[in-house]
Image (spheres, rainbow, N blue to C red):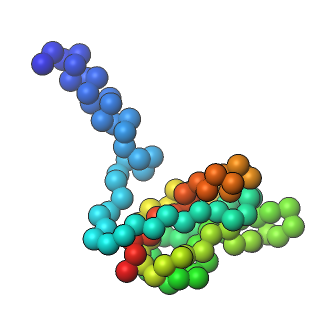
Amino acid sequence: MRAATWTALAVLAIATLPASGLSAPACATEIVEIYPSVAGVVVKVPEVGARVREGDDLVFVRTSTNPQAVTARATVDGTVLEVLVKPGDIITLEMVSRRAVLVRICKG
Protein backbone atom coordinates (compact mmCIF):
# COMPACT_ATOMS: atom_id res chain seq x y z
CA MET A 1 0.00 0.00 0.00
CA ARG A 2 1.04 3.57 -0.48
CA ALA A 3 2.22 5.67 2.47
CA ALA A 4 -0.84 7.97 2.23
CA THR A 5 -3.16 4.98 2.56
CA TRP A 6 -1.30 3.72 5.65
CA THR A 7 -1.45 7.19 7.18
CA ALA A 8 -5.20 7.41 6.57
CA LEU A 9 -5.72 3.98 8.14
CA ALA A 10 -3.62 4.93 11.17
CA VAL A 11 -5.61 8.15 11.68
CA LEU A 12 -8.88 6.23 11.36
CA ALA A 13 -7.73 3.64 13.92
CA ILE A 14 -6.71 6.33 16.42
CA ALA A 15 -9.97 8.25 15.89
CA THR A 16 -12.00 5.19 16.85
CA LEU A 17 -10.27 4.72 20.23
CA PRO A 18 -12.14 5.80 23.37
CA ALA A 19 -11.16 9.15 24.92
CA SER A 20 -8.75 7.42 27.31
CA GLY A 21 -6.92 5.87 24.36
CA LEU A 22 -7.48 2.39 25.78
CA SER A 23 -10.41 0.06 25.45
CA ALA A 24 -12.29 -1.12 28.51
CA PRO A 25 -11.07 -4.38 30.04
CA ALA A 26 -12.80 -7.53 28.83
CA CYS A 27 -15.82 -8.78 30.73
CA ALA A 28 -16.63 -12.48 30.83
CA THR A 29 -20.25 -11.80 31.80
CA GLU A 30 -22.80 -9.10 31.02
CA ILE A 31 -21.84 -5.41 30.78
CA VAL A 32 -24.43 -3.18 32.48
CA GLU A 33 -24.72 0.52 31.62
CA ILE A 34 -25.57 3.03 34.34
CA TYR A 35 -27.54 6.20 33.50
CA PRO A 36 -28.05 9.54 35.30
CA SER A 37 -31.20 10.45 37.21
CA VAL A 38 -30.31 14.05 38.16
CA ALA A 39 -28.66 16.87 36.21
CA GLY A 40 -25.77 18.82 37.70
CA VAL A 41 -22.00 19.21 37.86
CA VAL A 42 -20.15 15.95 38.52
CA VAL A 43 -18.27 16.06 41.85
CA LYS A 44 -17.38 12.40 42.48
CA VAL A 45 -17.05 9.22 40.39
CA PRO A 46 -15.94 5.63 41.13
CA GLU A 47 -12.53 4.28 40.17
CA VAL A 48 -12.18 1.81 37.33
CA GLY A 49 -11.72 -1.63 38.85
CA ALA A 50 -13.72 -0.83 41.99
CA ARG A 51 -16.03 -3.59 43.24
CA VAL A 52 -19.60 -2.34 43.66
CA ARG A 53 -22.79 -3.80 45.04
CA GLU A 54 -26.32 -3.23 43.81
CA GLY A 55 -27.55 0.07 45.27
CA ASP A 56 -24.08 1.58 45.81
CA ASP A 57 -23.84 5.29 45.00
CA LEU A 58 -21.60 5.75 41.94
CA VAL A 59 -21.78 9.29 40.57
CA PHE A 60 -22.47 12.41 42.61
CA VAL A 61 -23.42 15.83 41.22
CA ARG A 62 -23.77 19.33 42.61
CA THR A 63 -27.20 20.80 41.91
CA SER A 64 -28.70 24.20 42.69
CA THR A 65 -30.25 22.77 45.87
CA ASN A 66 -27.83 20.02 46.91
CA PRO A 67 -24.00 20.16 47.02
CA GLN A 68 -23.71 16.37 46.60
CA ALA A 69 -26.71 14.57 45.12
CA VAL A 70 -26.55 10.99 43.83
CA THR A 71 -27.26 10.82 40.10
CA ALA A 72 -26.29 7.19 39.46
CA ARG A 73 -26.42 4.00 41.54
CA ALA A 74 -25.19 0.51 40.74
CA THR A 75 -28.03 -1.68 39.48
CA VAL A 76 -25.99 -4.90 39.84
CA ASP A 77 -23.08 -6.34 41.82
CA GLY A 78 -19.87 -6.19 39.80
CA THR A 79 -16.69 -4.35 38.85
CA VAL A 80 -16.49 -0.86 37.36
CA LEU A 81 -15.15 -1.27 33.81
CA GLU A 82 -15.42 2.27 32.50
CA VAL A 83 -16.32 5.73 33.82
CA LEU A 84 -17.40 8.10 31.06
CA VAL A 85 -17.59 11.31 33.13
CA LYS A 86 -15.12 13.08 35.39
CA PRO A 87 -15.41 15.69 38.15
CA GLY A 88 -16.29 19.04 36.59
CA ASP A 89 -18.31 17.56 33.72
CA ILE A 90 -21.89 18.78 33.40
CA ILE A 91 -24.77 16.31 33.21
CA THR A 92 -27.59 18.11 31.43
CA LEU A 93 -31.33 17.46 31.53
CA GLU A 94 -31.00 16.21 27.96
CA MET A 95 -28.42 13.63 29.07
CA VAL A 96 -30.82 12.47 31.81
CA SER A 97 -33.76 12.23 29.40
CA ARG A 98 -31.83 10.39 26.67
CA ARG A 99 -30.18 8.09 29.23
CA ALA A 100 -26.56 8.93 28.51
CA VAL A 101 -24.21 6.23 29.83
CA LEU A 102 -22.12 7.37 32.81
CA VAL A 103 -20.58 4.10 34.01
CA ARG A 104 -20.23 0.56 32.69
CA ILE A 105 -20.12 -2.35 35.13
CA CYS A 106 -19.08 -5.94 34.52
CA LYS A 107 -21.83 -7.92 36.24
CA GLY A 108 -20.77 -10.56 38.73
Q: Toward the viewer: 26 or 43?
A: 26
- Residue pushed farthest right? 65
Which residue is painted at 28% across and 71% down in the image?
Answer: 28
The picture places residue 41, in percent across and down from the top left corner, at 72, 58
Above/below status of 100 relative to 34: above
The picture places residue 34, in percent across and down from the top left corner, at 54, 66
Above/below status of 1 relative to 63: above
Which residue is painted at 40% across and 75% down in the image?
Answer: 107
The picture places residue 96, in percent across and down from the top left corner, at 68, 56
Which residue is painted at 30% across and 35% down in the image?
Answer: 13
Q: Quadrant of residue 82?
A: bottom left
Q: Toward the viewer: 103 or 14?
A: 103
- Left or right of 98? Residue 48 is left
- Left or right of 43? Residue 23 is left
Quarter placement of the C terminus: bottom left
- Residue pushed farthest left? 1
Q: Is residue 90 visible?
A: no
- Left or right of 73? Residue 81 is left
The picture places residue 29, in percent across and down from the top left corner, at 32, 72
